[in-house]
Image (cartoon, helix red, strand yellow):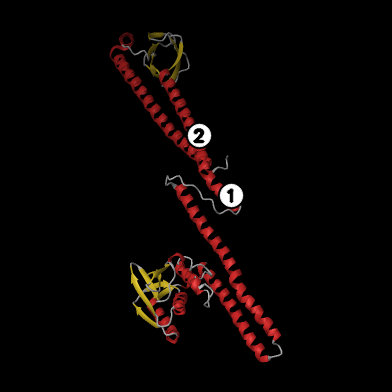
Amino acid sequence: MLRSTVLRLAIGYAALFAISALVLAGYTYWATDSYLARQTDKTIVAVADAMLERFRNEGIAGLSRAIEARLAEEADEDEVIVLVDRDRRVVAGNLETVPAGATGPWFALELVREQRSSTARMLRLPLNTGHVLMVGRDVQVRLEVRKVVADTLLWSTGVTAAIAILLGLVARRILTRRLASISSVADRVVLGDLSPRVPLTGAGDEFDRLSGDINVMLDRLTELMDGVRQVSNAIAHDLRTPLTRLRGRLETALAAADSPARFRATAELALQELDQVVRIFDALLRIAEIEAGHRRAAFAPVDLAAIATDVVELYQPLAEQRGLVLEAALDKAEIVGDSALIAQALANLVDNAIKYTPAGGRIRVATVRRDGLAEIKVADSGPGIPVEEREKVTQRFYRVEHSRGSPGSGLGLSLVGSVAKLHGGHLALHDNSPGLRVVLALPAAG
């Protein structure tokens, strides 16, 4: 239990509060007791001054009468006045005897009044006649009140500390209960089950926000694991065909070993199959590198219009060879990013458009800046992509049905999507009526 952070914090705050309360209570106690003591001393001094004035005017006889008259008239039972002679016999006052040993001006006198013990604070004033006048007040009630106040302060501090610890235990139990659901989900995730999610209470507090973040993390982890499984399955499926063809080519080459021409032709076809396998792995490694974010170090100001101009010029001859019109409408649109990756992504989009647009079709490349985004648009007049498959085509190795017979690995749009995510943008596919319009939207510079 002592390992609980919540409980340790509660104990720490309880100790801090108790110390603060003790310091405040001690100061309050000291200030109050000092004030009461000063008031008591002022009252004693005032009575003593009055008695001394009477002595100076009327002598011992007048002082004795004044003492008796004051004690007879005053209703203050706490007042103590006594006048003794040289032999310490009581001449006047409300004490029968005076103990010896009182030498200083101020002293405490133990009294027994009405069958109870009490303490009086006394002021001793020697007179020039050899008499001694002693004036004081019974302070037993003040002493008892001081003790009650001190005990109350100590008990209240202790009770406060105990309540703070108790509240810490309650808070620990509540927090443990809130964290139990997170621990349960974490245990199941450790065992390999990514389906559970942390329930939300709807309170919108820190635990709900933490639970939401954990759920988002688990969703992303599930997405990544599904992607790994999909990629593994796709690699196994898509590489099987070229590897099988490669094996067939090699067997044919062995069978044609006696014919150098046939052997050379078969070897060239085998090399083409190997090149296709290498291109697939190169694309996968490139996508993995992009998604890892390593290319952010190469970010710099990039003009999308300049990149689009270069890509259009590069693919213009291929488009003309296939009987296509490749045109550009380029407005200045700047971003901060990796120019090589942007160029490769745009090249993939233009290459796909040329590959799937029939002869006589039109392909349009445009760059525009709007609403804080710099957009690259590639629109064609080809067969397009069905709406239900537009989200799937950005997955690795996924290919729509009408494109399975054409060359390719199904990694082009996946790479474009990874480039978009790396730059904080997104890839969108729309209907071009006819054809497909692909929009690569990236945060504009500035």
Which amino acid does the dot numbered 1 rest on? Asp
Q: Residue at x 45, y 64 (%)?
A: 388
Give the answer, above or below, for where 107 lies relative to 389.
above
| Residue reaching furthest to the left | 57
Q: Position of residue 14 (x, y in %)?
A: 49, 37
Q: Which mark is residue 187?
A: 1
Which amino acid type is marked by label 2?
Leu
Tell me the crowding category of disc 1: few under 14, some 14 to 19, or many 20 or more residues within 10 angstroms, Cα based: few
Q: Could you say whether the residue bearing mark 1 is in a helix, strand or loop?
A: helix
Image quarter of residue 266: bottom right
Q: Are marks 1 and 2 in contact (CB under 8 Å)?
A: no
* Label 1 to label 2: alpha-carbon separation: 30 Å
Mark 2 surroundings within 10 Å by alpha-carbon count, few (fewer than 14), some (14 through 19), many (20 or more): some
Residue at screen point 36% across, 76% down: 366
Of residues 8 and 109, the one drawn nearer to the viewer in this rendering: 8
x 51%, y 49%: residue: 198
Q: Is residue 275 left or right of residue 213?
A: right
Dot 2 falls on a residue whose secondary structure is helix
Numbered badge on residue 95: none
Q: Nearer the viewer, mark 1 or mark 2?
A: 1
Quadrant location of the C terminus?
Answer: bottom left
In this figure, which residue is indicated by the disc labeled 2?
Answer: 166
